[in-house]
Image: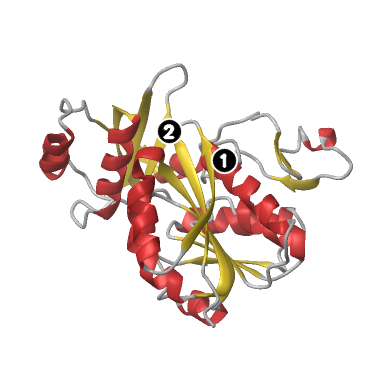
């Protein structure tokens, strides 16, 4: 049996699109089940989509977005709302994405794995309903950051926060064969991560958890972490600065991604206030990925 959901869509330029996505994600009413942002190929625009379990109207969303639209000084976006069947939403895919290389990592669907170099760390991921196939600049940058960190030391306790398909957690598990906690607020993403871990022979190492933050027992028990990989959005990253820092051990590393370059200063400030310091930036397109370290106090 399927249920009817309501999908709200609008097109905006990049900075405004991610500000609106942050807002929709944080609203209590109407409360979205998920919020996604997709680049429109060949344009400077992004599509923001929010999925709701109950019927809603364009006027209700515009009322909630009004102050932000005014602050951004942008035109009121055209919002379309359509009914979708839950099974259809979950089954959407982006078939036939090409394989990608990120440092030593090679990520592909079944059709592309045979092209992997012999020494590559291979991950089998089919494009589907969860974010994080490695093709987006943020995921690719996190993989590059992980590859760089792995050349210096091993990490025993790792958290993939906002795991999407689980690609980052699985990459860490492939490197170190250690138990990785992979959490996401979206139960669909957690299910996809579980399936991907099984497909890659990593079910014994990757523990997927549906969790909204560090209050979840599975995340608390696994702390303190040597490495946290957090590819989410700027607003939740800033909100998590304090609880994340408290659960990273001295000398531990944090990789933050999902933020635009124009949002970097605010995110860096939030973590600097908590005692984490920048060691590296990776810039790709409009996106910034930050590698931070928690110092050892003597």
Q: Pick the residue in front: 238 or 274.
A: 274
Residue drawn at x 61%, y 30% is: 95
Which label's residue is closer to the chain start, 1 or 2? 2
Q: Quadrant of the C terminus?
A: bottom right
Residue neighbourhood size for the residue with mark 2, other residues' Cα within 10 Å, grouped as few (<14), some (14–19), many (≥20):
some
Callout 2: helix, strand or loop? strand
Residue neighbourhood size for the residue with mark 1, other residues' Cα within 10 Å, grouped as few (<14), some (14–19), many (≥20):
some
Q: Pick the residue in front: 57 or 84.
A: 57
Residue 233 in the image: x percent, y percent? 39, 49
In the image, is 67 to the left or to the right of 183? left
Residue that lies at the very extreme toward the right in this rendered image: 118
Residue drawn at x 50%, y 46% is: 289
Q: Which residue is mark 1?
A: 128
Separation of residues labelled 1 and 2 (CA atoms): 14 Å
Question: Nearer the viewer's eye, disc 1 or disc 2?
Answer: 2
Q: Pick the residue in front: 56 or 116.
A: 116
Residue 271 in the image: x percent, y percent? 39, 62
In the image, is 125 to the left or to the right of 60? right
Q: Quadrant of residue 279?
A: bottom right
Residue 219, label in figure = none
Residue that lies at the very extreme toward the front in this rendered image: 298
Q: Which residue is mark 2?
A: 38
Residue drawn at x 58%, y 72% is: 251
In the image, is 73 to the left or to the right of 4? left
Q: Is residue 183 visible?
A: yes
């Amino acid at each position: 049996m399927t249920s009817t959901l309501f999908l709200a869509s609008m097109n905006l330029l990049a900075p405004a699109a991610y500000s609106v996505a942050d807002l929709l994600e944080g609203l209590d009413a109407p409360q979205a089940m998920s919020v996604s942002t997709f680049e429109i190929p060949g344009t400077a625009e992004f599509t923001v989509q929010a999925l709701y379990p109950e019927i809603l109207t364009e006027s209700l969303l515009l009322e909630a977005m009004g102050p932000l639209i005014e602050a951004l000084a942008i035109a009121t976006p055209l919002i379309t709302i359509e009914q979708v069947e839950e099974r259809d939403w979950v089954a959407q895919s982006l078939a036939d994405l090409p394989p990608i290389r990120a440092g030593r990592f090679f990520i592909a669907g079944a059709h592309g794995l045979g092209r992997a170099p012999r020494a590559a760390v291979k991950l089998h991921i089919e494009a589907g309903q969860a974010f994080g196939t490695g093709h987006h600049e943020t995921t690719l940058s996190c993989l590059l950051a992980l590859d760089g960190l792995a050349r210096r030391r091993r990490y025993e306790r790792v958290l993939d926060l906002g795991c999407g398909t689980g690609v980052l957690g699985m990459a860490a598990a492939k490197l170190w064969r250690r138990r990785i906690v992979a959490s996401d607020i979206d139960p669909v993403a957690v299910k996809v991560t579980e399936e991907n871990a099984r497909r890659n022979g990593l079910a014994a190492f990757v523990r997927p958890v549906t969790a909204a933050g560090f209050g979840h027992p599975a995340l608390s028990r696994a702390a303190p972490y040597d490495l946290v990989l957090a590819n989410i959005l700027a607003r939740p990253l800033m909100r998590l600065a304090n609880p994340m820092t408290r659960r990273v051990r001295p000398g531990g590393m944090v990789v933050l991604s999902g933020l635009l370059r124009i949002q970097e200063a605010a995110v860096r400030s939030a973590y600097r206030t908590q005692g984490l310091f920048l060691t590296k930036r990776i810039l790709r397109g409009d996106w910034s990925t930050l590698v931070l370290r928690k110092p050892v106090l003597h």
